[in-house]
Image: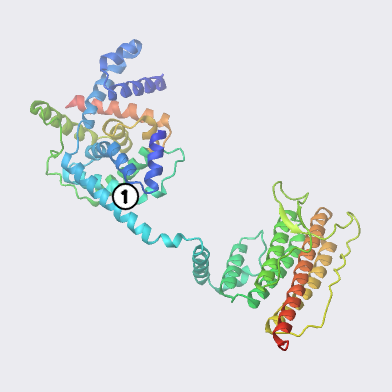
Amino acid sequence: MHEEENLVREAQGGDEKAFASLYETYVNRVYRYIGARVNNPADVEDLTEDVFLKALESIGSFKWRGVPFAAWLFRIAHNAVIDHSRRKVYRESLPFSGTEVAKDDPAKEAELRIAMRDLKAALAQLTETQRQVITLRFAAGLSLKEAASVLGKNEGAVKAAQHSAVAALRRIVGQE
Amino acid sequence: MRRDLDDILNKCIDRLIAGESVEACLESYPDEARELEPLLLASSKALALGAQEPRPDFKASLRYRISSEFKARQKKRQRWSFLAHPWLRPWLATVSAFLVLLVIGGGAVQAASRSLPDQPLYPIKQVVERVQLAFTPSGAPKARLYAKLAMTRSEEIAEMVRGGKAELMEGLTQRIAENLENSQVHMGAPLSATLTDTKVRGPAGPAGVEGVIPTLSPEPQGAAFVAPPTQELTKQPIPLTKKGEEIEELKKILERNKERNERRFQEALKRAPERARPALERAYRATNAAYDRVILSLEEAQKQESESNEEKQAPGP
């Protein structure tokens, strides 16, 4: 965490390598988080790009006040997803197929694509908070503390929401 | 119980994300295994959300885009970095303040002119003064404005006495001394301290509030409030140049202000509650000393100006 704090400070001071390092740390996780919420792969890429350009634009205003950098970054990602859904620019007809999912193993790739499709259908039936908790924890791989910080809730509340989200997911997936 | 299961499930999800199996987790919690198993199976399915990866060419092109953007921003930052130059900052602040005043409008500015340091409009009064200072030419006009501001602070002290706010009084006293010193500097009078600078701290003020305020010899505590005698200033007949006239004019203003200052303090002391009196007396002595010091300095400047003028006018060999 200390190392990340230094990277953020250096990036704020104009060190390009430091920002590049933060980008490498988070690009896959941001992409997965957006990919779990948005259907069209082109939109996922566009939004991922928007998130990092926005982060670059506002990194100067980021302050370490108990908020982890990951939480700050995923708030930007969350806002980007919400704005996107408000603009109603989903291209639902296109399958979610543009990402790299185990390309070296076609059978596994097909299996994962089906799992992804089913999961996204199940996620659509959850409440917004439950959907958020699942995508932040399982797609972005954030810790409970980081997820709580993104959601602006305490850890106990997020833990309870996570339990109810997984239980709901089990019911939905079990019915299919 | 529910909270326990929330905790256990959370720990198991962390372990699944880290690559452990559902079975390993269930083994750790045999008592909760029956309830936990379906939740962990659903969780392991949800892990598929983390299996997607961005295309390598997309990642590379975004990295390039960010790098270009970063460089462009750095260039732009360097182009405007002169705005952060120390000598430019006060001007930027003044121009911003002027624009704020334009937006606020005349009514608020008028109302603020009568405000006191503990009132909400006081910051506007300070902005107005800063703008006045910025747009007043250096030299004699600015020196006169500083003298006027010192008097304004004295008037504020007199008003503050009614509330017995000794801690604010000290800050104002400090600003009177600063304003008088600025007046002296803008008139080109020598800054050599003819009176001693003493650190004072008011017993009624908050801890840590200190200021360097020039004082005359201390008055006996608890004695009736009597104005300390003004220092004897030697006066010589001096032929006046333009600068000499300006110095003379400022000196007269300051002598008049000093008298007004004395009267205000004496009136204020009559109205002051007992607990505010020591601070008020201290403020009076400090401001009076500051006036004496500047007047004396102006006398010296006047003398120097006169000597220099005499040298210029003296016939050659």
Q: Nearer the viewer, residue B62 or B44?
A: B62
Crowding at dot 1, Cα within 10 Å, few <14 / some 14-19 / many 20+, comes out as some
- The residue at the point 85 percent across, 63 percent down is B270
Residue most toward the front?
B317
- The residue at the point 44 percent across, 62 percent down is B83
Task: Report helix, strand or loop for mark 1.
Answer: helix
Chain bearing mark 1:
A
Image-based side of A5 in relation to A53, left or right: right
Q: Quadrant of residue B144?
A: bottom right
Total marks in image:
1
- The residue at the point 79 percent across, 72 percent down is B260
Q: Nearer the viewer, residue B273 or B265?
A: B265
Image-based side of B159 in relation to B66, left or right: right
Q: Quadrant of residue B29?
A: top left
Residue most toward the bottom?
B315
- What residue does disc 1 label? A54
In the rendered view, tell whether residue A81 sits above or below residue B10.
below
Image-based side of A119 in relation to A77, left or right: left
Where is residue B76 drawn, in percent x and y?
34, 59
Does residue A86 appear in this view? Answer: no
Quarter of the C terminus of chain B within the rendering: bottom right
Q: Nearer the viewer, residue B261 or A115?
A: B261
Where is residue A95 drawn, in percent x and y?
12, 40
* Rendering colour mode: rainbow
In the rendered view, tell whether residue B155 sits above or below residue B51.
below
Where is residue B47 drawn, in percent x and y?
24, 27
In the rendered view, tell whether residue B2 sits above or below residue A70.
above
Quarter of the N terminus of chain B within the rendering: top left
